Image: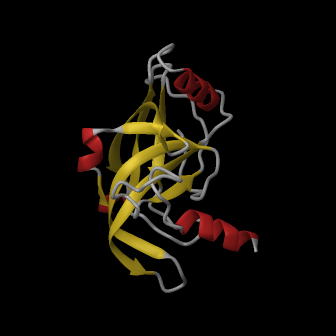
C-alpha cells in the first residue's frame, strides 16, 4: 500500500501551479530526488551542487535520462522554487548533463533579499534538506517492461527544493 501511494504521488500529473489554473501547463510532472551534502570549497556560501535527476530508475521505476532533457526553455528563466510554488522563487539553477545525469549548481538569492531563500539555503548547507524535484513534461516516452516509463525526451520546466525524495540515486553534492 505504501509503495502504491509513493508510485501515485511521484507519477501523477499535477497542476502548475498546484490547486490553481494550469495556464497551459497541466501536463507538468514532478519527480523528487534525494541527496546528501558534501563540502565543495569551489562553491560560494550561497551555492550547492546537485544532481537534479540521476538518469536511473526511481522508486516507481521511471527513468529520465539526462541526455533526453531539453532545458533550452528553462535557461530563459532558470528559477528554483520552494516546494514547486512558482510564487516562491529562491534561486537559480544552471543545468548540465554529466554521465547521463542532469546536474548543476543552485545559487540561492543573495542573503537578505528573501527570507525564504535564506531559510532554504541554511537548511541545505546544514544538511537538513537534501532533496530536489524536477518539474517536466515528457515528449517521447516508452513503457518499461517491468513497469515504469522511460522518458526518452523531456522538457525541464522548473527545479524545486523539496523535502520528499523519489530517486534515491540523485544527490546534493
Identify whether 172 is placed above or below 110: below
Picture coordinates of residue 13 (x, y %)?
49, 65
The answer to whether 31 appears left or right of 25 in the picture is: right
Q: Is residue 8 left or right of residue 96?
A: right
Q: Residue at x 50, y 20 (%)?
A: 114
Which residue is the extreme one toward the top?
Answer: 112
Question: In front here: 155 or 125?
Answer: 155
Toward the front, the furthest residue is 21
Residue at the (55%, 54%) spot, across then down: 32
Which residue extends farthest right? 1
**Horizontal arrangement in the rendering, residue 53 relative to residue 58 (left or right):** left
Q: Residue furthest bottom?
A: 145
- Looking at the image, residue 67 sits to the left or right of residue 82; the answer is left
Residue at 41%, 60% (x, y): give it: 28
Color theme of the render: secondary structure
Q: Is residue 63 above or below residue 42?
A: below
13 or 149: nearer the viewer: 13
Residue 170 in percent (x, y) is at 53, 52
> Can you give x and y, in whole percent of width and height, for residue 101 in the image?
41, 54
Total count of labels = 0
Give the position of the N terminus as an image quadrant.
bottom right
Question: Residue 95 at what x, y percent from top left?
Answer: 34, 43
Amino acid at each position: 500500500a505504501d509503495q502504491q501511494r509513493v508510485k501515485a504521488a511521484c507519477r501523477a500529473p499535477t497542476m502548475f501551479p498546484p490547486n490553481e489554473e494550469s495556464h497551459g501547463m497541466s501536463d507538468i510532472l514532478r519527480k523528487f530526488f534525494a541527496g546528501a551534502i558534501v563540502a565543495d570549497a569551489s562553491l560560494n556560501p550561497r551555492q550547492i551542487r546537485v544532481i537534479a535527476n540521476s538518469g536511473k530508475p526511481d522508486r516507481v521505476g521511471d527513468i529520465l535520462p539526462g541526455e533526453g532533457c531539453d532545458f533550452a526553455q528553462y535557461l530563459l528563466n532558470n528559477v528554483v522554487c520552494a516546494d514547486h510554488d512558482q510564487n516562491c522563487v529562491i534561486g537559480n539553477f544552471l543545468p548540465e548533463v554529466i554521465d547521463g545525469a542532469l546536474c548543476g549548481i543552485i545559487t540561492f538569492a543573495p542573503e537578505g533579499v528573501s527570507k525564504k531563500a535564506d531559510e532554504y539555503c541554511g537548511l541545505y548547507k546544514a544538511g537538513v534538506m537534501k532533496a530536489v524535484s524536477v518539474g517536466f513534461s515528457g515528449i517521447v516516452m516508452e513503457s518499461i517492461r517491468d513497469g515504469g516509463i522511460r522518458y526518452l525526451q523531456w522538457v525541464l520546466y522548473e527545479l524545486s527544493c523539496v523535502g520528499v525524495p523519489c530517486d534515491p540515486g540523485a544527490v546534493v553534492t
